[in-house]
Image (spheres, helix red, strand yellow):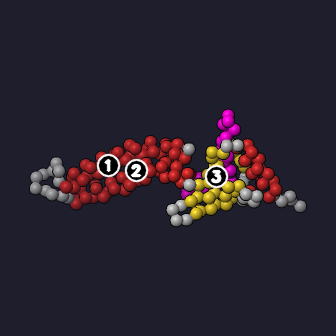
């Protein structure tokens, strides 16, 4: 599931990386003096183009690896609902990361349900601002829930129990 959610970036990364590798091949040929005047082994100008293209190759390879990395991370993660909080536990190579969400932090819940009753829940915490100052929704999505309505009811109950009535 995580792979397919990020497959769009992979489709963009394929031509990006191919062009960056093409650029590097041509630049490296120019740097080493292939196709240029005879007797010229390499040039600083060619070296500049080789170095200029390296970050683009690295970015392309990173974008191509992203869906696989996200899929691996999702396979090593589990959502846990306790009596007081919702937690995401992710197993790393040498550490365990736990991210807790308190029920009172959840502003709204969006349920996506399939015909078999499975689905996903999107927990919305409100709005924030990105680095450009644009409004963005702060949320987390719990995916692959076998009985999504039941889990939604549990979370809504937790939210109601955690709210303190106004005096």
Question: CB of mark 1 within 8 Å of CB of mark 3?
Answer: no
Image quadrant in which you'd find residue 117: top right
Q: Is residue 16 left or right of residue 98?
A: left
The extreme left residue here reads 39
Q: Is residue 145 left or right of residue 6?
A: right
Q: Residue placed at 44% from the left, 42% from the top?
A: 11
Q: In which quadrant will I find the C terminus?
A: bottom right
Question: CB of mark 1 within 8 Å of CB of mark 2?
Answer: yes
Q: Which residue is mark 1?
A: 21
Q: Is residue 131 magenta?
A: yes
Query: Crowding at label 1, few (<14), some or many (≥20) Cα neighbours within 10 Å?
Result: some
Q: Magenta segment range?
A: 113-135
Query: Crowding at label 3, few (<14), some or many (≥20) Cα neighbours within 10 Å?
Result: some
**Gap in angstroms between the C-alphas marked 1 and 2:** 9 Å
Q: Which dot marks residue 60?
A: 2
Q: Is residue 117 magenta?
A: yes
Q: Residue placed at 64% from the left, 49% from the top?
A: 142
The extreme bottom residue here reads 94
Q: Residue placed at 63% from the left, 49% from the top?
A: 141
**Gap in angstroms between the C-alphas marked 1 and 3:** 36 Å
Going from N to C along the chain, the mark reached first, 2 or 3, is 2
The answer to which of 13 and 38 lies nearer the viewer is 13
Q: Position of residue 120 (x, y in %)?
A: 65, 44
Q: Which dot marks residue 140?
A: 3
Q: Position of residue 39 (x, y in %)?
A: 10, 56
The extreme right residue here reads 167
Dot 2 lies on which element? helix
């Amino acid at each position: 599931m995580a792979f397919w959610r990020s497959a769009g970036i992979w489709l963009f990364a394929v031509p990006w990386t191919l062009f960056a590798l093409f650029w590097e091949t041509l630049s490296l040929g120019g740097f080493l003096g292939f196709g240029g005047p005879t007797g010229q082994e390499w040039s600083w100008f060619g070296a500049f183009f080789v170095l200029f293209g390296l970050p683009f190759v690295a970015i392309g390879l990173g974008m191509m690896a992203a869906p696989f990395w996200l899929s691996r991370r999702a396979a090593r993660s589990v959502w846990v609902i306790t009596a007081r909080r919702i937690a995401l536990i992710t197993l790393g190579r040498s550490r365990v990361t736990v991210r807790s969400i308190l029920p009172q932090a959840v502003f709204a819940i969006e349920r996506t349900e399939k015909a078999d009753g499975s689905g996903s829940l999107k927990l919305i915490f409100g709005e924030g601002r990105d680095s450009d100052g644009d409004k963005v929704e702060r949320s987390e999505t719990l995916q692959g829930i076998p009985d999504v309505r039941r889990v939604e009811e549990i979370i809504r109950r937790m939210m109601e129990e955690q709210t303190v009535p106004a005096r």
